[in-house]
Image (cartoon, rainbow, N blue to C red):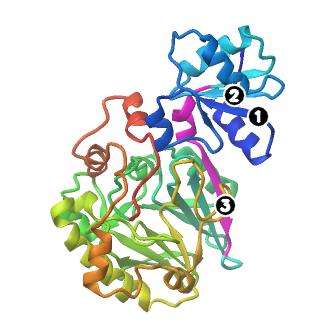
Amino acid sequence: MIEVHSARWLADAIDDRREFTLLDTRPVDSYESWRVPGAVSFPFGPTEALSDEQLATLREVAPSERPVLTICGKGVTSANLAVRMDRAGWDDVAAVSGGMRDWNDLYETAVFEPSDDLVVVQFGRRGKGCLSYLVGSRSAGEAVVVDPGRHVDQYLAAAAERDLTITAVLDTHVHADHISGGRALADRLGVPYRLGEGAIERDVAIDYAPLADGETLAVGDTDLTALSTPGHTSELVSYRLGDHAVLTGDALFVDSVGRTELQFGEEGAAEGARMAHQTLHEVFGALPEDLTVLPGHVHVDSDGTWATAEPGSLVGARLGDVLDGLALYGLDEAAFVDRMTGDLPEKPANYERVIRINRGVDEPADATETVTLETGRNNCAV
């Protein structure tokens, strides 16, 4: 019988630098758009048999003396290939259950402790690069969650592990690349769900308590201050954690800024870019340089690697260093807008429908569609 390994097993094997060959059976265009690091493309069908030519190729790219794993979109074609290879003489071949869909739902955590009292747990979604946070005070025994994904149990577990009670759930904005777990988590706990007051302009139909620019929430003795930082979206707010950090959502990443046409469209992208220019220079440029930037995403390359960190390590950097290293910072408005609206990368998968769901004006048909809608990397940066 062919062995089956989970996406978690695969991630641990990669991190432990175990020796194996990973064969990706999806179509070439899917592979080239997004894959697990180190995967080799070998398109294969759910009922296909191995030809002599394919066997020759496999012996070249996946020698039989080395363990082989197969992966596909959801675990069907990869299982077929694993069975065929086993019958053809490979001794150690296994399939990854759930395929890229399970890889897409895998999280890693890192901890940032800016003071004796404060603890910030960063949740990094390994395949997509989405980042979310539990921000807590040990002395008060309280915490807030920022930008939660739909897998809400992990925030409850992290809070319980640290004897923290979640008192509020915050989103920085209406997300375009993943379905928010904000309202669901807030409802489950019976606590407020907060968005920036500009969300009224997005016709958000989900119940939320608006946060005004400059309004504060207490995390123990430290203020968490909402800062209006539009550009990527009109209602986007960042959250300054005292003199320690700023949680920037999609307004500012450690190596880029958020694109503007996902809300505003191609025709309105320039207006969004002008907002982003003002945010970058007048808001972030006026903050203390020693604040740690904790962004809403890490860029995931098409080969599946994280651009600015390793999975499981903290994605964050000193604000002054982020701005110094950002080619967009310091440009005049016209040049900035040109750069922001020029040659843009591929948009997030299904972003228009994801936005409608996060606004509360639509909902997924079922759990399968929810997973499908989020498939792929985040693609929210310029």
Residue type, mark 3 in image:
Ala
Q: Work out whether mark 1 precedes mark 3 in sequence or the reverse, and give the earlier one.
A: 1
Q: Which of marks 3 and 2 is nearer the N terminus?
A: 2
Asked if labels 2 and 1 touch by Cβ distance under 8 angstroms, the answer is yes
Q: Do the residues labelled 1 and 3 touch (CB within 8 Å)?
A: no
Mark 2 closeness class: few <14, some 14–19, many ≥20 residues within 10 Å: many
Instruction: Looking at this view, name the residue that lies furthest to the right.
Output: 65
Q: Which callout, 1 or 2, points at the residue further toward the start of the chain?
A: 1
**Crowding at label 3, few (<14), some or many (≥20) Cα neighbours within 10 Å?**
some
| Residue annotated with mark 2 | 69
**Front of the two marks 1 and 3:** 1
At 36% across and 44% down in the image, what residue appears? 349
| Residue type marked 2 | Leu
Which residue range is magenta in the image? 97-113
Using the image, tell me which numbered label, if any, was put on residue 110: 3
Name the residue tied to disc 1.
20
Residue shown at 59%/14% (left/top)?
Answer: 80
- In reply to whether residue 206 is colored magenta, the answer given is no
Query: Horizontally, is 322 left or right of 137 in the view?
Result: left
Q: Distance between the residues labelled 3 and 2?
A: 28 Å
Q: Where is residue 367 in the image (x, y as percent from the top left)?
A: 41, 30
Q: In terms of depth relative to the viewer, which is nearer, 6 or 100?
A: 100
Instruction: Please tell me whether mark 2 sits on a helix, a strand or a loop.
Output: strand
Quarter of the picture containing the N terminus is: top right
Q: Does the magenta stretch include residue 109?
A: yes
